[in-house]
Amino acid sequence: MKFDTPAGQNPIDRLKVVGKPTDRIDGKYKTTGTAPYAYERHDAAPDAAYGYVLGAGISKGRVRRIDTAAARRAPGVLAVVTTLEHPRLERGMMNAAYLFGGDEIQHYHQAIAVVVAETFEQARAAAFLVKVAYAPVAGKFDLAAEAKGAKPVPGDSGEGSGGNGEERVGDFEGAFAKAPVQFDETYSTADESHAMMEPHATVAAWDGDRVTLWTSNQMIAWGHESLAKILGVPKEKVRLDAPYVGGGFGGKLFVRADAVLAALGARAAKRPVKVALTRPLVMNNTTHRPATIQRVRIGATKDGTITAIAHESTSGNLPDGDPETAVNQTKLLYAGANRLTAMKLAHLDLPEGNAMRAPGEAPGLMVLEVAMDEMAEKLGMDPVEFRIRNDTQVDPSDPKKPFSHRDLVGCLKLGAEKFGWAKRNPKPGQVRDGQWLVGIGMAAAFRNNMVMKSGARVRLGRDGVVTVETDMTDIGTGSYTIIAQTAAEMTGVTLDRVVVCLGDSNYPVSSGSGGQFGGNSSTAGVYAACVKLREAVAQKLGFNATDAMFEDGQVRAGNRAVPLAQAAAEGELVAEDTIEFGDVSKEQQQSTFGAHFVEVGVDVDTAEVRVRRMLAVCAAGRILNPKSARSQVIGGMVMGTGAALMEELAVDTRRGFFVNHDLAGYEVPVHADIPHQEVIFLDEVDPMSSPMKAKGVGELGICGVGAAVANAVYNATGIRVRDYPLTLDKLLDRMPEAA
Amino acid sequence: MKSFTYERPGTPAEAAAAVARTPDAKFIAGGTNLLDLMKLQIETPTHLVDVNGLGLDRIEATAEGGLRIGALVRNTDLAADPRVRKDYGVLSRALLAGASGQLRNKATTAGNLLQRTRCPYFYDTAQACNKRQPGSGCAALDGVSRQLAVIGGSEACIATHPGDMAVAMRVLDATVETVDAKGTERKIAIADFHRLPGDKPEVDTTLRPGELITAVTLPKPLGGKQVYRKVRDRASYAFALVSVAAVVQPDGSGRVAFGGVAHKPWRSEEAEAALARGAKPVTDRAFSGAKPTHENAFKLKLAERTLNAALTQARA
């Protein structure tokens, strides 16, 4: 199905199943431990041996020698595969660093060997017996030091934000120089780890020259193609299966060492092999969100109208890596005739920087939305009012291009009302509650809505059960549930008559999960397949497809009603289709919007910052399932709070690695850290987005929330910190004298 | 994890003897720290002597009016004991500020005293660490050191004792009771139990090889307001950046010990004599001679302000 005109009335609009806060259909399996994750696929690959990955102990240089003799003799060891036994293997899609093969070390904990043994403990113990001789060379590990030599580069997060090294509209410098009120500050954000619950894990099994990988991956089709290339096996002979994924946040968009080394280990051991990356390897072997240094300049008239805005960002990466696209929301979020955005990239020899939940926008809005708060204060304006004043209904660089639907102002106003913004004391450092200095802050949220081609197959069984098959993944987001809701709505059956099968590369290729494009795109693909199924059913039952109503397990037209199952009485009906998005999705700018409001307390003595309550108001098209969408948004809010207050991969700039590489050292906020969160969705539909009229919401929640936290800290203390995370040591020197 | 042998002796002296006669043997109780370290091959005992069956799990009144806490009393049970809650509030509060519910259910009194540092370089076997591998150097000195010691460190090591419980025990002047292979009992003042790293950072305590902790005794109650204030980046679960254990008497005098700042709980009896005059005179004295890194210099100010918070709380 080609989506090239705005969606008209369709069966989804009935909202009998779609749009309801249905419980997750996979929830009962996950909460009872009966949803097998990749490492637990004993059902599919019994008798798997265990692979333990050894990471390089240097950050840059060469491996001179690997002595595996003692490891091979160790109890239970079946095979040892070292990087020196292989030529440098091809990279998969979007990989900047090489995953395995050859003697070059590009970053710390790059995989150099896998030890396969009968038990995990034996494999790990044997891995400690592997002796490695290195020839290290000096590397570059300090972004601040390398920033001066950084070059402008284009970049695309692959997840909806991208641009050229430098983009200009009008004359920024001229307009900024003339602006009656000017603002110019520089900020920095830290390297961050995805820190998903389930580490990267794979079980691999060979059957002759065919290999199956039960793995944890967000993008099955990308992984499929990449593994075929890396392993040098025709694509038809590679199968991936990932029905359950325990979180990804972008860290599992691409194939990583677990999959490659499970396959190589299994080939060497002639047995299925399972590999999970240890937490230190998740942090230093895989990818992370790169640190940035960002400068924002805003020029405005005294009434708060922005006349010039510039946002420049510098990040670092390995030679083939991309920049963090932190400036791109600034092209679209606020009006202003004169604009400059620029991205620079420095060469660093740290582990690979790559996509993490809302790449670009998460660190970009952390900075832009603090700058907006600072500028509002400079103008003597209310921060909410300042944003409303500079709203735009068109792409500021292309005024002929309107937003498909944009209600940022609605989010700001409703959020302000519900949160009690009017009670905020605009003068910072004034509100005290016992030991706490209390402040509230806000920020706008913005994230582009991407649409991706997505396919599905739908089967109507003799028993009337509708089965959906698509390689879409559910990474904890609720894909199973919204896909089931879509199929139920389209075929007129109840949810318990729908079976959803996901994550298998034998199924039709879907959008996959990333860039908040999965929910809308994959359900649109299911919609397309269901339209075809409805046609087949109508034909079988002698209905005119356009007249037939699919309701209550029946197909009806006029006075005639036939049970749906009857269409499959002679055999299962199968329909397959792919939604493809035509120019309609490019003619108008599709984005999602929100407003975050946060209240914090800052301990008057110790400067510990504790979040007290949070509210997000989101405008993201039709919400397919308010319950799972809310979970996505509050998860994003938690993650953004982490970025604002505590998450930082600490770089040892001499030795070149992330030092705090476990969950004791890399702290993320948990339930006990955030007592109260609320999410409101504006009731809207966007017919430009897809037949579902939905947009992405999985990343909107993290966008801007960190800035709202930082702005609240400023309101509480009067201390502006521009180096994130905003840990207490950065406040302490400027805290008021202890009472 | 390296293969190891395992035994469960019948008495404390037998346990001590078992460790004394086996090279590279270790006691295991809750295992909440030791097992992690064994998995990472930071600890590589060849023989484990399980002391869980020795019955050292009671809390009893002493003739001196104090409490004798068995070595195997779990952190959860110790924190919840009514006598501890009533008379040694600082200890109960320190315990509850540490770790998580699950860990406290398993962790023991003696094991808590013996937990090893959380310096990240200690945990990464590819990095130089004199505590893990004597003579290899200290990567933390010019590395990431925000969490590490500001005082009492050496050129060989700037690790901290990461615990909370020991800080409260230090302010209470607890005594560690031990037994050795010959059955000889010994009492070690808590002040002398943990050592500074000096040129032997691999040695955390003054225990002799094979010496087994049987109990920790607390002197008779000190009265006063008892506060434990732990400062951390995350409210839910984290090691202390700085912590303060304070016992403050109605006249403003009292005692104070600091955690998260040194290789041992940090207390200066001289410094605390100034407690009635407020936080600054105490921390100025207690931290004179501090040698922070540029990453952790904030801990000095934080210690002062945390003590101030503790004093405010005590006077409330």
Image (cartoon, coloured by chain):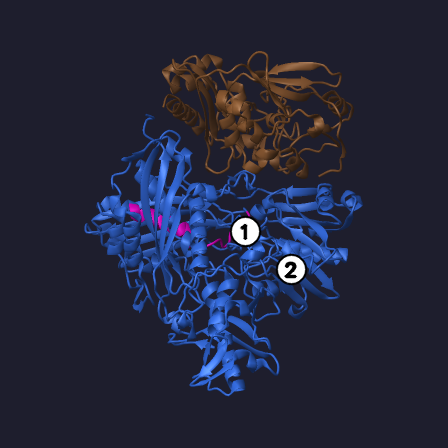
Determine which residue is flagged by label 1: A287
Query: How packed is label 1: few (under 14 Cα within 10 Å), some, or many (20 or more)?
Result: many
Which image quarter: residue B225? top left
Most extreme residue toward the bottom is A542
Mark pair 2, 1: CA separation: 21 Å
Q: Nearer the viewer, residue A296 or A559?
A: A559
Q: How many marks?
A: 2
Residue name at image x 69 percent, y 19 percent: B208
- Disc on res. B80: none
Establish if B202 lies above or below A126: above
Q: Which chain is blue?
A: A
Residue A316 as seen in the image, left or right of residue A82: left
Name the residue type under label 2. Trp
Establish if A644 lies above or below B203: below
Where does residue A648 sit, x and y in percent of width and height? Answer: 48, 42
Element type at mark 1: loop
Frontmost of labels 2 and 1 is: 2
Q: Chain of mark 2?
A: A
Residue name at image x 63 percent, y 60 percent: A90
**What colour has chain B?**
brown
Name the residue type under label 1. Thr
Are the residues under badges 2 and 1 in a single subunit?
A: yes
Determine which residue is flagged by label 2: A214
Residue name at image x 78 percent, y 23 percent: B21
Q: Classify the position of the C terminus of chain B by image quarter.
A: top left
Where does residue A4 sit, x and y in percent of width and height? Answer: 41, 76
Q: From where the camera sits, is residue B147 visible?
A: yes
Where does residue B195 sit, x and y in percent of width and height? Answer: 59, 20
Earlier-in-chain disc, 2 versus 1: 2
Q: Over which residues does the magenta segment extend?
A: A351-373
Residue name at image x 30 percent, y 46 percent: A373
